[in-house]
Amino acid sequence: MKLWNRYSGLILPVLVVAALAVWPVITGKPANRESAFTILKAVALASSLNILLGYTGYVSFGHIVFYGFGGYVGIFLLTEKGWSLWTAILAGGAASGILAFLLGSAILRLRGAYFALATIGVNEAMRAFINNFELFGGPTGITLNFSVYRDFGGAAHALQTSFYIGAGLALLALLLSYIVRTSKFGLGLLAIRENEDAAEVMGVVAPRAKTWAYVLSAIIPGMVGVLFFFKNGNVEPHDAFPLHASIELLVMVMLGGQGTVLGPILGAFAYQGMRGYLVTSPIFKDIQLSVSGALLLMIVLFIPAGAIGWLRHRVPPLRRVLA
Amino acid sequence: MKRSLFSIFTVLVLMGLILSACGPGATEAPAPVEPAAPAATEAPVEEQPAATEAPAMVEKTVVIGFTSSLTGSQEVSSKRQVNGLNLWMQQVNDAGGIKLSDGTVVKFAAQTYDDESNKERVQELYTRLITEDNADFLISPYSSGLTAAASIIAEQNGKIMITAGAAEDDAYKTGNTSLFQLYTPGSLYLISTVDMLKTLDPEAKVAIVHENDKFSTAVVEGLKPYLESHGFETVLEEGYASDTADFGPVINKIVESGATVLLGGGHYPDGSTFARQLYERKAGLKFVSLLVAPADSKFPELGDAALGVATSSQWELVATHTPEEAAVLGKEWYGPTGEDFAAAYEAMTGDKPTYHVAGGYTAGLVLQKAIEDADSIDPEKVKAALEAMDIFTFYGGIKFDTSPEAHGLQVSHQMVVAQWQKNDAGELVRQVIWPADVATADPLYPIPAPQ
């Protein structure tokens, strides 16, 4: 019981991700595996964004740049340099982290709307750069030869392996989110979110803390990018840096409840689960975009604080559990 | 309380409006054909009395799975491709299906989802098509990028995927053995156009301006060495983003380069905008050839801006392939004539077929032929039949590369050059201007200067 009380904020998110990972294994259905992969990918990306958006209070409209850049670096190393998938994933994460450090040092001096606008510019600039970067294939991108999958026993096993790695990355993202949330460093971030100037007066070194928060929020997306493009078989600029995906991530974080560990996971699950259901539903599949838009509108109208915020407000005993 | 009720009421009204607006038009489901459509198969339609005398037949419904872009940038061409496939399916089912020697009658049903012109869910949807909807055969999504992602799922599950609208060469050079391409590969798209220019104006200065995507770049990569080998000077090469809406800076560069001929484009949204702005800015080019957009029947909506714009086309009704052509080439003819296909399509949709429609229809036709040749729906036997296929249809030649290096790449189909010209009544019509032996009109060269 003591353990539960102490770690309930971690146990619940781990249980949700574990359930998602086990669901396709229990049902034995590859279609469920693919649906779960899409959700787990969103969980990893939304949880990472939450470190910047939820804990630090900085809205990034271009966070997908780390997913695309890391993905490109990893796939390049995999196809052109013969690196293994594992090392390529680590390299993709490291590349995104370094990019975030360099970018953060410059654009995190901006606040509010100015920072948000700068992140859009970064994403578009990176897309334009990759489009003209011949080493990464320019506009046609990089296509994987099927021989890459032989190490995994063929395409079928490679997709299965990708799923398990995806589940691992989602778990890693939520662990990182939890560790940041419960650490002294995380408290500093929360202080920056509430009032940056006051936080600095209280001893928080805001520029350094923000930069590290940006770096931590970029590493997992870079790793996820490598995995997704490996699974997809090719990477192109417009798939790697889709601005709409950044906005979808913001929706997921806010839907579940920003600034909490469980919130982005629930948001990602609800958003991608709903989209996945609607796109394959015999009733809604032809009007799925309209229906999902209308549903989101209703959610924003009636529970603007997100699912976790609503639950914490309505059911006070849950406040200890829903960190 | 009043505020909450008002909010709920507003949302419900909004949802109602959205649903009613999207409901009927979103899918563009083809209307049923009133008169009996001409049979796609050459097998005679079994009459009622004969059916009662024949031994008991087992009917098997084969599920064809595919995603289509009901929304997003590929919407226009993707919907036409699906319409073509639906027409074929309707015809073959109305004709009684395919009869195999073991008494099985094969009929077809489609299972499809919206991929939103977006790669994110393509693998998820194709996995669902195969494992949940039990699709027996697959048709590719529209566009090379989406097909590349879907092809991995096809290969993983050993499912045959016939590709229409996936011209880029690379997808067939990955070691995949499940893809079979109908379109002339992207690297050969503009070869006929260069051959024509060599005859019309060997001194032409060429500007290459294209969409920065997989397909258009592959076309340009094939074009550049061919232009060079024919002695043409390329004075400008420029790529533009897929969502470009303002071509002003690009057009300025074209004018400054001194180019007399423009080759390039991409897909429908950007291509039609580019053509309109070229006309409005009076770019003064002698010849303009754009990919995909001018091949669509909506293109004349641009009015005079469409006049003279040419395109490389996979198929044109006015120069449709014929049984006589097949006989001269010594190839087996299969399927309906182009005129019969076009009449059935017009009866179904009220629209004239484009090459995207013909591609979708031929995807079904090729599958039908492979099942007939294999006398089975067993995937391995059908695959063997596809690999051995060397036929001629109204759409043109169909033969696939069987080498491990480029398995499934189309090696027989030829393209034509089509151009929007005015007929005697002053209406815009698409004429075939090259190759000369199938041309229906002389090239409009130079194209008239804008008023």
Image: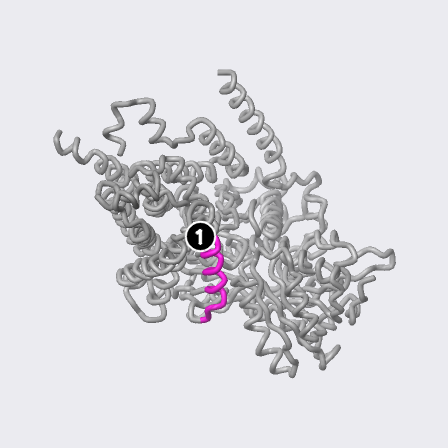
Q: Name the residue: 60% across, 35% down.
A: B22
Residue B174 coordinates in the image, percent (x, y): 42, 66
* Quarter location, residue B95: top right
Answer left or right for B120 relative to B73.
left
Relative depth, front residue between B105 and B344: B344
> Which quadrant is home to the C terminus of chain A?
top left
Answer left or right for A201 relative to B395.
left
Residue A243 coordinates in the image, percent (x, y): 48, 50
Residue A230 seen in render: no
Q: Does the magenta stretch include residue A121?
A: yes
Query: Considering only vertical position in the picture, is B228 above or below A29?
Result: below
Q: Name the residue: 28% across, 53% down.
A: A161
Residue A94 coordinates in the image, percent (x, y): 30, 60
Q: Name the residue: 47% across, 63% down.
A: B171
Residue A275 seen in render: yes
Q: Does the magenta stretch include residue B1?
A: no
Query: Considering only vertical position in the picture, is B353 above or below A298?
Result: below
Residue positioned most to the right: B424
- For mark 1, what is the residue? A119
> Which quadrant is home to the N terminus of chain A?
top left
* Quarter location, residue B405: bottom left
* Quarter location, residue A147: bottom left
Relative depth, front residue between A106 and A291: A106
Q: Residues within 10 Å of mark 1 (few under 14, many from 20)?
A: many
Q: Name the residue: 62% across, 59% down.
A: B334
Label tally? 1
Residue A140 coordinates in the image, percent (x, y): 49, 65
Relative depth, front residue between B59 and B317: B317
Q: Tag 1, which secondary structure?
A: helix
Residue positioned most to the front: A201
Relative depth, front residue between A294 and B319: A294
Q: What stretch is highlighted in magenta?
A: A119-134
